[in-house]
Image (cartoon, rainbow, N blue to C red):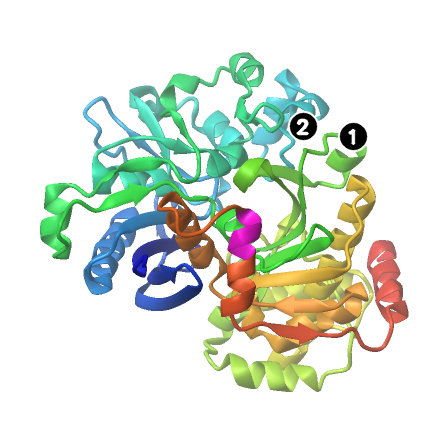
Amino acid sequence: MTRVKAYAAVDLGASSGRVMVGRVGLDSLELAEAHRFANRPVRVPEGLRWDILGLYAGVLDGLRAAGQVDSVGIDSWAVDYGLLDADGALLGNPVHYRDARTEGVAEKVWATVPADELYAATGIQYAPFNTLYQLAAAAPSAQLAQARRLLLVPDLIAYWLTGEQGTELTNASTTQLIDPRTRDWARDVAERLGVDLGLFAPLRQPGDAAGELLPRVLEETGLTGPVPVTAVGSHDTASAVAAVPASGERFAYICTGTWSLAGLELDAPVLTEESRAANFTNELGLDGTVRYLRNIMGLWLLQECQRTWSEDDLGTLLREAAGVPALRSVVDAGDAAFLAPGRMPQRIAEACRASGQPVPLTPAQVTRCILDSLALAHRRAVEDAQRLAGHAVDVIHIVGGGTRNALLCQLTADACGLPVVAGPTEGAALGNVLVQARAHGLVGDLADMRRLLTRTQSLTRYEPQGGTARWREAEARLATG
């Protein structure tokens, strides 16, 4: 009988990191937290930077707390990277995607490769922080000139753990340098824009071997080698979508956390001009799938407000927000005006004032405005995705931290007029674990992974209430405001 195997999932989010331990058998799946640590960006004179050494220390602490495991997998947020010199040493802390260095850069890129051509070649939505724009912004820098290797964040952590370099495909697809049809580099785009693809390590697929923990890592973590590192869907959204407990194909998903990623799982990219105008992205997923989705600002809006208010009691905020009249005020939760940190309650109030809506003044009113706005953005994304892809859905699956927010889940069901199934909360970590387990033969294809999730994870179903007419009215009000 096959024994239960243990897998460490290193899951790095934009506000915190964690090392989770998944125990997988032929018909069992359990997940436990070994260690959680803060991810606090640092503003230095040259801009906003990730504390990558602090994150790596957290990873080592987490592996020590995890105990003996059969494999390690790493996922994180997308687009950001570290640069290495010829000796493999890191050239400075990775730049944070919310840094201002890419302001105005996209227009310079489009002067060489027009936006419609860029989308037709890569399928990636416009976002000012895309890796392509970051590289264009860094082009004049001495640091980039000195660089001999570029590693996306999870690949950088894997390199420090194993000494081996690779570029995992699902995360590489977010760089705006991958052709989603060939699932390989968009070489013509790179050549026209002067991007040296030689900076990137060879592409890896989820499930590929990514090395073994180095002796010094084994010593520091107390683990006994050999401990393999397995490439997973290293973009956390790729892992989270793999952990959607869906049956069949008629589902939409919303991966909630700092961001809301709302869309569909498809067999092929949608590269039409209409899709580009709607700002949908075609990122790569497991088993040849495409994650066709729209980025929405997500619970970052509320996190930033809580930071301003010095308010840690989310439960009280949500209870009070539930008593605020619905759809009193809404903002565009996809607006780049909310991307940068700081003054979030004031910026939301200013947006409401500018559109002629009641201005939310209390924390409860601001919170309700945010949640209504997110639900409205979820509605628009799910409806637009179905129309643009010609792919109808019957249910919406919400995975990630937002599953704990019952009010948001119910509002999303109400806005979309579709049932919402919420769970699992630790979707990215579970997807990470299951790809490792599949590499060891404990689970089969994506459908098999999802059947195991459905049998073993706690899920909550929300039925739509109240009809969608008021949401259509709010949508129209926002469009004309």
Q: Residue 211, image x and y in percent?
A: 25, 36
Image quadrant holding the C terminus, namely bottom right
Q: Disc 2 marks which residue? A: 119
Question: Which span is picked out in magenta?
Answer: 446-450
Q: Position of residue 454 (x, y in %)?
A: 56, 65
Residue 32 location, quadrant = bottom left
Task: Give the Cα separation between the discs numbered 1 and 2.
Answer: 8 Å
> Could you tell me which residue is drawn at 63 percent across and 81 percent down?
364
Nearest the viewer among 477 and 432 is 432
Residue 442 seen in the current view: yes
Q: Amino acid under label 1?
A: Glu
The residue sitting at 78% across, 71% down in the picture is: 414
Local secondary structure at mark 2? helix
Q: Would you name the residue on which mark 1 appears?
A: 273
Quadrant in the picture for residue 159: top left
Q: Residues within 10 Å of mark 2 (few under 14, many from 20)?
A: many
* Main SS, magenta residues: helix
| Marks 1,2: beta carbons within 8 A | yes
Q: Is residue 171 left or right of residue 9?
A: right
Is residue 77 positioned above or below 211 on the image?
Answer: below
Q: How many marks?
A: 2
Residue 448 is one of the magenta-drawn residues: yes
* Quadrant position of the N terminus in the picture: bottom left
At a point 77% along the width and 82% down the height, the residue shown is 325
